[in-house]
Amino acid sequence: MRPVWQTHACKQRSGRANIQNHDAEANMLTPTIDARRQLPCLVALCLLTCQAPGQDAPVRQLQTVYEQGDGNQTATYEQTIAFYTKLADGSPRVSMHQMGPTDSGHPLHLVILADPPVPKLSDVPTDGRGILLINNAIHPGESDGVDASMMLARDLAADPTPLSNVIVAIIPMYNIGGALNRNSTTRANQNGPKAYGFRGNARNLDLNRDFIKCDSLNARSFARIFHTLDPDLFLDTHVSNGADYQHVMTTAHSQKDKLGQQLGGYLQNTFQPALFGRMKQSGFPTVPYVNSGGAPPDRGFSQFLESPRYSTGYTALFQTFGFMTETHMLKPYHQRVTATRAFLDHTIALLSREAPTLRRLRTEDRKQYCRRTTVPIAWQLDRSVASRLEFHGYEASRPDSLVTVGQRLFYDRSQPFVREVPFYDSYRPSRSVTLPAGYLIPQGWHTVIALMELNGVKLHRVTAATKLSAETYTIDEASSRTAPYEGHYFHDDVSVSSTRGEITAAVGDVIIPIRQPAARYVVETLEPEAMDSLFRWNFFDTILQRKEHFSPYVFEEVAAELLANDPQLRQEFEQRQQDDESFAGSRSAQLQFIYERSPHNEPAYRRYPVRRLLALPAAAQGPHF
């Protein structure tokens, strides 16, 4: 018999689907569906005959749009949700949940496949089975995973044997706004399907650059899904751009050195070789994503480094390693869908076998991270080290362009080859920091605190003014891009200096202890020099602008008095005049120099408000694991 949470009563022939609506804030189940948001689902459900509780519908007969076509069609958003609605209504092993809003106005859905079913979503992380989360249509024109996942879900509902030690969670379509913006022209480099969605979402954001900054409602709802499930393995389905080669499937997976601890070696030496070996046996020899920068990859290429703006970089902050399946854009659509389906099947089979080991390593790595003295926050490619991989490519040449001046890159498919090429897959830390006891975030930075809470960070609210020993950063350099990038003027170059001293935490401020499962997320978002820190994404840009200043004609007399009363300042001022010709000829620069070294200079200017705590107050020292 189905659990109560999984069986919305179907009292009428057009009754409600087996969909649960999880309130965005309280994560509560509600028994109703917003008809304005669920009209496509309700229309599809009018065609269904209700099943009595515990009675399976003939889900095996359900056909996808892809299967009904000629191998070059993909389902629309409405067709996809209708398919999963039928599946959830027809099988006790399938449940469907609304997990929060998206920028499109439609809810983000989550489909759970488990045998036996899990009574509540909150029970999933402690169930004991391996947990796989599959994300589809982050770029809706790259729809291979949408169709592969629908067939996978149908087949698992009909034959749950692969679910013996695994719970499979599927986000049917993540970028709903882009999926609704359907066309047949924007994927200029791609071979099918006939119609597809657009890369930008309802706000024209590339959602695969939004996981750390959470500008979109999609990303915030994804965070709720991710932290509700705490998956052991994450898959994000894509289609590649770049070079031409024989491989149908490549993957941009978690980088071993950046993943670090024990998980990095386990991924590199155990899980990935086994997965790639199974793919080769299935007729889809798989290599890492071809990251050759426009050059022919037959001379070798480097591994893509996924920073936390990307899905797999974000999940790695919580010790969940991931794969982005990157099928080759020029291969026929049916080959790409078949390869994606094979990848999903082999991943489930491997996770079923490896789940106990993987869960143990994740727990150990979380604890070990907090015990380290220093941790890396940025990485750089080490070209002194290269592995070898078997690459199936095409010979390349550079004939004259038929259209423009110069030459073009041409891959000759009549000249295939298989050869070993160097693969640069080692990265070394380019910046590390010592681990503090914790961080203090003043309550005024509520947008940052909200992100911490959204991502499951354990925090302590100060209830009485408290003296703390802390380290304070000053932002010495923050050079920004000259053009917007995903709605921000990202800071590419950041450098800081620091001082130590006593500060006062006010009532309502937030202390974040470092000894907790989300420690790596905390460090790599709050350390300003980290490669995808919140500072780089402009969350703290107000400190880079002065709020007070001086009128030169008034400050002239103050400056003269300061120089007369401070011999050291006068010496520095005169030395600068001698050393810097432009400074010596600029009255405004000279007054600015004196102002910045005077008591009138505002202390908040370029002072990073998040403090590194050298010790925690007793109230914040409780167990956090």
Image (tube, rainbow, N blue to C red):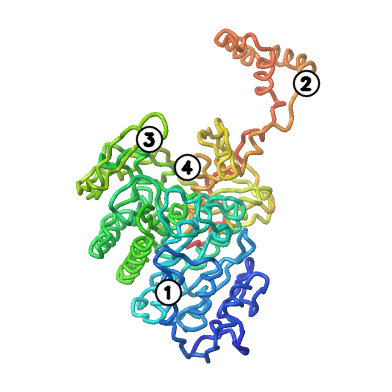
Q: What element carries label 1?
A: helix
Give 330 or 611, whichever is nearer the viewer: 330
First in sequence: mark 2 or mark 4? 4
Which sits earlier in the primary sequence, circle 3 or circle 2? 3
Q: Distance between the residues labelled 2 and 1?
A: 69 Å
Q: Distance between the residues labelled 1 and 4?
A: 37 Å
Residue denoted by label 3? 402
Q: Where is residue 300 in the image (x, y as percent from the top left)?
A: 27, 41
Q: Which of marks 4 and 3 is nearer the N terminus?
A: 3
Residue holding disc 1: 153
Residue located beneath label 2 in the image: 551
User: Is 445 on the left or on the right of 78, as rendered?
Assistant: right
User: x, y percentage for residue 241?
Assistant: 40, 48
Instruction: Return the x and y of residue 293 as percentages of the image width and height.
Output: 37, 39
Asked whether, in this view, residue 133 is left or right of residue 180, the answer is: left
The alpha-carbon separation of the residues under discs 3 and 2 comes to 63 Å
Above/below status of 487 relative to 584: below
The residue indicated by pointer 4 is 531
Disc 2 crowd, CA 10 A, few/some/many (<14, 14-19, 20+): few
The kind of residue on which mark 2 rests is Ser
